[in-house]
Amino acid sequence: MLLTIPVCGYFEVNCYLYADDVSRHGFLIDPGAEPQKLLAVIAAKKLVIDHILLTHGHFDHMGAADILHRTLAAPIRMAEEGRLYVEDSERNLSGPCGVPLTLADVAYFDAKTQPMFQAGACRLQALPVPGHSPDSVCYISLDEAIGFVGDTLYQDGIGLTTFPGGDPRALWYSLNDVIFALPKETMLYLGHGEPVRVGSLRAQLRR
């Protein structure tokens, strides 16, 4: 089961529920806002959330994470580099937007080890894709041709690199070495906008 749930706080962002249809255990990815809306969907689908996964530490992707963590008793997981963002409202952009927000109870992982997380029969592997921010990761399914890429990609091209820690050279390395290396049929689910297949993306962007 894969559900795209647009949520809107300061910005609209795509939150994703990815779950095993049999066990009903699953992942919640980038819960940026509207926790009650997300809880209602989880309850309606009779899901058990085993992991709350963040693709990076910008506030529009984590705004509901703490409430959901406390309500669902599911760990918040993100790359270690994200600590600089979720603990600093200036770097995570919530302060400049007038809605200061931080997270404290986070289970950090070393993205360089490419850890795998499991919920029921669903498995997601975290791959580092720095560029939009140094903590950016994508979560690639080991069972289906899908991946969740946060803001590494936008609807009309590559992610922005104008925020603190953004690095355009690193982003292009991430695209060429990680994203474009995925099978061409892989469908990538973005933080903002509609999904895109790797094959189409290669044809559009590859340098």
Image (cartoon, rainbow, N blue to C red):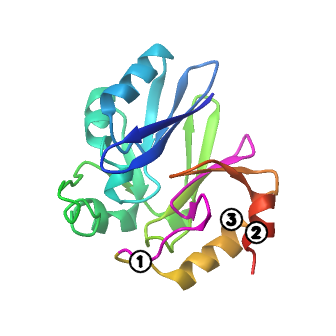
x and y percentages locating residue 42 in the rendered image: 44, 22
Characterize the local packing of mark 1: few (<14), some (14-19) or many (20 or more) Cα atoms within 10 angstroms. few
Q: Position of residue 63 (x, y in %)?
A: 30, 46
How many numbered marks are there? 3
Asked whether, in this view, residue 122 is left or right of residue 96, the answer is right
Measuring 57% from the left and 57% from the top, which residue is drawn there?
A: 138
- Distance of mark 1 from mark 2, alpha carbons? 22 Å
- Where is residue 184 shown, x and y percent of the image? 82, 57
Quarter location, residue 83? bottom left
Crowding at mark 2 (Cα within 10 Å: few <14, some 14-19, many 20+): few
- Whether the magenta-drawn stretch holds residue 159 is answered as yes
- Quarter the C terminus occupies: bottom right
Q: Label 1, on which residue?
A: 162
The reply to whether the C-beta atoms of the residues labelled 2 and 3 are less than 8 Å apart is no
Q: Nearer the viewer, mark 3 or mark 1?
A: 1
Identity of the residue drawn at 36% across and 51% down:
11
First in sequence: mark 3 or mark 1? 1
Residue 130 appears left or right of 197: left
160 shown above or below 45: below
Q: Which mark is residue 179?
A: 3
**Where is residue 129 shown, x and y percent of the image?**
56, 68
Q: Which mark is residue 204?
A: 2
Identify the amino acid type marked 2.
Gln
Residue depth check, mark 2 versus mark 3: number of the one nearer the observer: 2
Q: Which residues are magenta?
A: 141-163
Q: Is residue 164 above or below residue 154?
A: below
- Three-letter amino acid code of the residue under disc 3: Ile
Query: Disc 2 and disc 3: Cα gap in Å?
Result: 13 Å
Between marks 3 and 1, how big is the CA–CA gap?
21 Å
Q: Is residue 86 magenta?
A: no
Q: Secondary structure at mark 3?
A: helix
